[in-house]
Amino acid sequence: MNSGTPRRQVFRLSREQRVAEIMSAARAVFREKGYEDAPLSDIAERANVVEGSIYRYFENKRDLLVKVIEDWYEGMLADYDLQLSGIRGTRNRLRFMIWRHLSTIHDEPALCNLMFQHLRTGRDYSHTAVHELNREYTRRTLDIIKEGMAAGELREDVPLRLIRDMIYGCTEHRTFAYLRGEGDFDPDATADMIADLVLSGLERRRPDTPPAPDLAERLERAVARLERMTGPAAP
Amino acid sequence: MNSGTPRRQVFRLSREQRVAEIMSAARAVFREKGYEDAPLSDIAERANVVEGSIYRYFENKRDLLVKVIEDWYEGMLADYDLQLSGIRGTRNRLRFMIWRHLSTIHDEPALCNLMFQHLRTGRDYSHTAVHELNREYTRRTLDIIKEGMAAGELREDVPLRLIRDMIYGCTEHRTFAYLRGEGDFDPDATADMIADLVLSGLERRRPDTPPAPDLAERLERAVARLERMTGPAAP
DNA sequence: ACCCGTTAATGAACACAATTCATCATCTTG
DNA sequence: CAAGATGATGAATTGTGTTCATTAACGGGT
């Protein structure tokens, strides 16, 4: 006996630790190489495990990917409400949500790519935990819209889902080139522009308010009088 | 000699015909099974060819996919301008572009999926012919926006690209569930909603439109105070 | 009609990666 | 310390993209 290749040293870990090690390794390798170009052998090597061992903790490669994204999402949602609670006003709150999404894409382009092109497109996505987490991720946005509607600041004749699609669709479409590795973008400036564009579309027109000629005239005369009193406006 | 398996009958075709047959078969199989789940053997079989033969006409599987999508796109763009030329008015023309995109997704969900998740996400996408064709596909939309701006109907303080991202991003985001095979959507109704939402955001405010509520209130109070200081306005 | 160079097409072999499973190693408990 | 339970291995399997040496059909010149 004791023939053939010498068996490698076996390190036993608790199930939880092993799972954590594999997921950590997988996240790193997926981030570097994407999904299809990431061989399980690479992940196994980085996790100090043999390929076959991965199948003791994950059903298959895709399941591993799902769990990795799931884990990432959970970490992200943690301090979401806290940050949001410090911001007042429909415009500012909405802008924050857009900025947050842009920043996530900016900081983790690779993981976002996995999410966008491998998770969200899967036939079984709606039954995934990631789907539920994503709903949680976007629910805040819908709440902000609802509040804005209730406060009379926003139009109410547009379906909420369409507004969500507009916000996130625009945001993501805007970052496609970046996700491909081409160029860069500024989350702050972009968030400003998108929030402005979306809100301008949502701000309620006052159909019932008369053009207020009254106010305009009074303003005109008041300013004229003010100028007479104080001299013409300084440049 | 003449030992082993009998060699199958060899049918010779011109290069063009063979390419056409393979691409036709590939389009069908890709449409049915997607990209990764479509074995080259299936495509070869449907094209009455052996697997290896495909490599005489295409560099690899991905190249075949690219060519298939390219071919499909070219066919689509053909009668695009003709249809558009019959439509007048910024709103109607824009709505048509949105409706066209929605209809394409509705009619060819599988091919759109291939485009969205395999072509557009590739690192080399910008150097592809498909990229150029896609620019052609969306250029009309930008032209419509420009015309609307020139005519004074649309705001001019928003980057064109952002508007394009908003239109197509919203459109595609709206159809994600459908592309996953969940439920259905109505291109007509959806196009109406999106066009309305986008345009409301782009339509120039009439100069006489009353200002936003809070500003109006502040103005109201300010004028009232001014009037108190200087006496009521003279008629 | 018959060579013979050119081009279409084949099919077997290769390479590589995901997945399975029988076997072994290590821990834990009575 | 024995013995079951569980962690981990690595060789084998399977499927699929890709290569390439070989063969079949075509067609123009003699």
Image (tube, coloured by chain):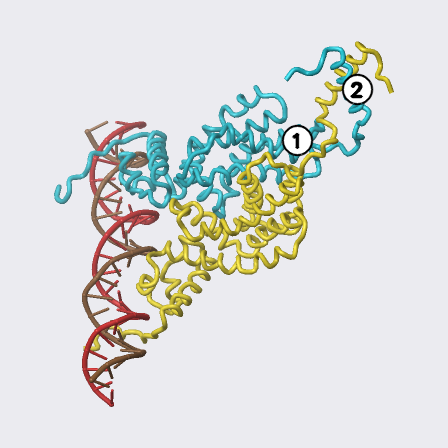
Chain colours: A cyan, B yellow, C red, D brown
Q: Position of residue B61 (x, y in %)?
A: 36, 56
Task: Tell me where residue B214 sits by quadrant.
Answer: top right
**Residue for point 68% across, 32% down:** A203
Q: Residue furthest right?
A: B235
Of the two numbered discs 2 and 1 on the same chain, state the one appearing first in sequence.
1
Dot 1 crowding, Cα within 10 Å, few <14, some 14–19, many 20+: some
Who is closer to the viewer here, A214 or C2? Answer: A214
Dot 2 crowding, Cα within 10 Å, few <14, some 14–19, many 20+: some
Residue picked out by circle 1? A146
**Residue for point 57% across, 54% down:** B106
Who is closer to the viewer here, A195 or A54? Answer: A195
- Which chain is indicated by disc 1? A
Residue type, numbered disc 1: Lys
Task: Tell me where residue A58 sits by quadrant.
Answer: top left
Disc 2 element = helix
From the viewer's perspective, tell me whether residue A206 is left or right of residue A112.
Answer: right
Establish whether labels 2 and 1 are both on one chain: yes
Q: Position of residue C12 (x, y in %)?
A: 23, 65
Q: Quadrant of the N terminus of chain B?
A: bottom left
Residue picked out by circle 2? A221
Q: Position of residue B73 (x, y in %)?
A: 49, 56
Disc 1 element = helix
The label number, if any, that marks residue B198 in the structure image: none
